[in-house]
Image (cartoon, helix red, strand yellow):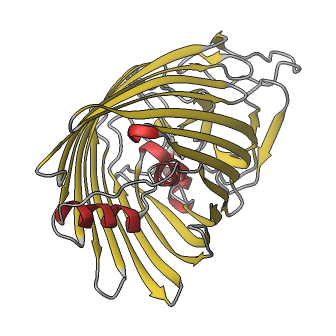
């Protein structure tokens, strides 16, 4: 599920027309002077994300921005997500019906023969609040600082961030450096499973139990960012970023298991997964926006990501805004490809020694993803705009070359995930 990238896209939304106008004014040696106090600006969005027979998500976003005197800017944002549906628990499909204990330890659910095991109890509501203050501190210098709070039923995230930017070359070049610190608390219902312990029957059955270690765990994340923005011409602007993240603490998914299978591919038991408690992540990012004389705009970006889990990925994203009188359409294509983590394995062979770390979660496996869509925008008046976005997303998991024993050769261990994304935006 690629919601994380859509959220970031909304969060970092750039008004291309305003940006290029500013670049043009800079190149001409002029500046725009505010003759009166600027009003609040609002962006609202309602998004639906739905996977076939799996997770669905509804998201509402309200963002507000206010520019005060001397280029002091306040940005506020509220995001509410509601997620429901079924998610893969990591177990392999089998020729016969399978029964699994629910994550809470209360009750069980069954998976039909030959189908990917899906936990249908997935349900959560997330509320996220962000506030950011930006202001100049000296000639050609700007600083910003912000706070972040996100709360789910079993997850709490608190964070702070800061950034400093320096303009050069008549404001045609900007260098920036930023940091963020986040502390997360994970409190799954039923507690934290003990790594590599077997899934037991529900607690209300004879011999049932949870194999849980504690009620909650923590993790911390430190993010560092270096950026360069360069005005190339009156019509073109480029951005380059390098980011580094250090994550320490609990990073295992408490709801995922790994199937232990015999030489015939028949599941003997399900073990709770285990992931490393440290992770270093790196990425480089390049984006170019070009405003053609026809008023069409192309927006192209590329991102390369790698970490010490041996996950690496490439993301190519392209949008092309085509004016239709006062309206516009914007076709969009995004391609994503990822290599698997060094501890990813779709199953564990019975009798083999357990590795130090192991996960069958397809999200850390080898995969490709493609998004195709279009946006239709209707500028109204007084700088207000209504837009609609509709996209189709497909994610295809791939084998790492694992040899499949027995009946697993006849089952689909790497099913694709299809999803529809629909969004309505109103800016005023």
Q: Position of residue 165 (x, y in %)?
A: 25, 37
Q: Residue furthest front?
A: 35
User: Which residue sits at x=52%, y=48%?
Assistant: 37
Q: Quadrant of residue 367?
A: bottom left
> Is residue 419 rendered to the left or right of residue 96?
left
Front-most of residues 319 and 96: 319
* Figure check: 393 above or below 403: below
Q: Quadrant of residue 244?
A: top left
Front-most of residues 295 and 216: 295
* Figure check: 336 above or below 382: above
> Is residue 83 rendered to the left or right of residue 359?
right
Q: Position of residue 107 (x, y in %)?
A: 85, 30
Front-most of residues 328 and 403: 328
Residue 271 visible in the shown view: yes
Front-most of residues 148 and 256: 148
* Figure check: 122 above or below 18: above
Viewport quadrant of the C terminus: bottom right
Residue 89 visible in the shown view: no
User: Which residue sits at x=89%, y=20%?
Assistant: 204
Q: Position of residue 342 (x, y in %)?
A: 32, 36
User: Which residue sits at x=34%, y=61%?
Assistant: 19
User: Which residue sits at x=65%, y=55%?
Assistant: 44
Q: Quadrant of residue 407?
A: bottom right
């Amino acid at each position: 599920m690629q919601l994380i990238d859509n959220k970031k896209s909304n969060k970092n939304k750039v008004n291309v027309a305003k940006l290029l106008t500013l670049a043009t004014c800079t190149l001409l040696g002029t500046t725009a002077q505010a003759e009166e106090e600027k009003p609040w600006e609002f962006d609202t969005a309602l998004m639906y994300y739905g996977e076939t027979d799996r997770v669905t998500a509804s998201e509402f976003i309200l963002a507000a921005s206010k520019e005060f005197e001397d280029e002091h800017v306040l940005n506020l944002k509220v995001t509410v997500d509601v997620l429901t549906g079924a998610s893969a628990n990591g177990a392999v499909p089998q020729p016969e019906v399978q029964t699994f204990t629910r994550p809470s330890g209360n009750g069980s659910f069954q998976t039909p023969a030959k189908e990917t095991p899906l936990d249908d109890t997935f349900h959560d509501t997330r509320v996220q609040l962000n506030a950011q203050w930006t202001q100049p501190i000296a000639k050609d210098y700007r600083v910003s600082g912000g706070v972040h709070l996100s709360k789910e039923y079993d997850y709490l995230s608190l964070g702070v961030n800061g950034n400093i930017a320096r303009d050069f070359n008549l404001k045609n070049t900007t260098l920036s450096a930023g940091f963020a610190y986040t502390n997360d608390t994970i409190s799954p219902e039923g507690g934290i499973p003990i790594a590599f312990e077997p899934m037991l029957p529900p607690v209300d059955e004879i011999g049932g139990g949870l194999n849980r270690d504690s009620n909650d765990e923590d993790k911390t994340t430190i993010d560092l960012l270096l950026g360069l923005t360069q005005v190339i011409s009156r019509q073109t602007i480029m951005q380059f970023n390098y980011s580094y993240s250090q994550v320490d603490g609990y990073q295992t998914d408490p709801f995922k298991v790994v199937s232990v299978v015999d030489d015939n591919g028949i599941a003997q038991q399900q073990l709770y997964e285990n992931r490393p408690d440290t992770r270093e992540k790196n990425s480089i990012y390049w984006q170019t926006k070009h405003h053609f004389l026809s008023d069409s705009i192309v927006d192209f970006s590329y991102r390369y990501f790698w970490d010490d889990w041996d996950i690496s990925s490439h993301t190519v994203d392209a949008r092309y805004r085509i004016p239709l009188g006062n309206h516009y359409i914007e076709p969009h294509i995004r391609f994503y490809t990822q290599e698997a983590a060094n501890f990813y394995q779709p199953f564990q062979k019975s009798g083999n020694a357990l590795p130090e770390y192991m996960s069958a979660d397809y999200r850390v496996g080898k995969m490709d993803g493609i998004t195709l869509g279009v946006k239709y925008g209707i500028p109204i008046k007084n700088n207000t705009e209504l837009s609609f976005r509709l996209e189709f997303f497909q994610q295809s998991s791939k084998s790492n070359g694992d040899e499949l024993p027995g009946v697993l050769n006849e089952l689909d261990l790497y099913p694709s995930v299809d999803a529809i994304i629909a969004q309505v935006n109103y800016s005023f």
